[in-house]
Image: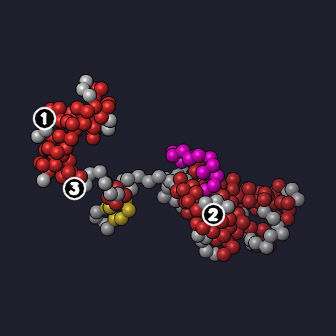
Amino acid sequence: MINKVEICGVNTAKLPVLTNKEKNELLTRIKKGDKEAREIFTKGNLRLVLSVIQRFGGRGENADDLFQVGCVGLMKAIDNFDLSLNVQFSTYAVPMIIGEIRRYLRDNNPIRVSRSVRDLAYKALQVKEKYITEKQKEPTVEEIAKALGAEKEDIVMSLDAIQDPISLQEPVYNDGSDSIYVMDQVSDKKNTDETWAENLTIAEIMKKLNDREKMIIAKRFFNGRTQMEVAEEIGISQAQVSRLEKSAIDHIKKMYK
């Protein structure tokens, strides 16, 4: 989808390529309000948008939508670029385009995340992009947290919150014949062999209790009732419930041995 020749009605195979000299001249004209220069400069940087949206392939997003959102980021970069900065326009524009696309993906995420968490995540991503641009390496969580004056745990939580959810049916490995899916890598602590065996044992023991013992054990330990609640439900005193419960537990201990 993203590699197609035409996107949003634009023939990507025929997009112009500007030299650094041409870019600088056009940017100077743009800052003076030259609309023609702005249009030429924008078309000359659409390849930059295309290169950025390549990073977001495989998410199932419509390429045309990503391209349009990326163009919004490009426009913002053109409006805010400072000619006095000793950096190339692309160095400044790429984080702007990425940020716009990430904001779009975040806001259209089916899992709703609070505004404060999203804002913190967005600021963290901005710090990360700036750090990478300046130092050519990724910052640690501690460095991002220090730059924002936030707790490390809050940074991790906010970044995790804006990640796209994945399907349990999504393949993580394929050797040409059989695939391993995400669900195959997830452990189920509730349905292990040990739990299954324990449940069978408990079921067998419960069968050997008398009806009243069975009822009290079920209400107390499976339904979470207090002794007082059980007493009120079956019409006996709490002391009687306590004695019956103790008797049932002693019975179970003898059978379990």
- Is residue 169 found left or right of 154 in the rendered image? left
Looking at the picture, which amino acid does disc 3 mark?
Asp
Cα distance in 3D space between marks 2 and 1: 61 Å
Q: Secondary structure under badge 2?
A: helix
Per the model, the C-alpha gap separating discs 3 and 1 is: 28 Å
Q: Residue 31: give x, y in percent of width and height.
A: 85, 60
* Residue 18, quarter of picture: bottom right
Indicate left or right for 254 with 142 as reference: left
First in sequence: mark 2 or mark 3? 2
Residue at image coords 66%, 70%: 131
The label nearer to you, 3 versus 1, is 1
Residue 194 placement: quadrant: bottom left
Looking at the picture, tell me which residue is in the foreground, 183 or 177.
Answer: 183
Q: Is residue 181 visible?
A: no
Name the kind of residue labelled 2 in the image. Answer: Ala
**SS at badge 3:** helix
Q: Where does the magenta region start and end?
A: 108-121
The residue pinned by badge 2 equals 145
* Residue with the mark numbered 1: 210
Residue 238 at what x, y percent from top left? Answer: 28, 31
The spot of residue 229 in percent (x, y) is 32, 30
Q: Where residue 94 sits: x, y (%)?
A: 67, 64
**Is residue 5 magenta-colored?**
no
In the image, taking residue 31 as reference, residue 113 lies left or right, namely left
First along the sequence among labels 2 and 1: 2
Identify the residue position indicated by label 3 in the image.
193
Q: Which numbered disc covers residue 88?
A: none
Of tags 2 and 1, the one toward the viewer is 1
Instruction: Verify whether residue 120 appears in magenta.
Output: yes
Q: Residues within 10 Å of mark 3 (few under 14, many from 20)?
A: few
Whole-number angstrom distance, CA of label 2 to CA of label 3 = 43 Å
Residue at horizontal 11 percent and vertical 40 percent from the top: 208
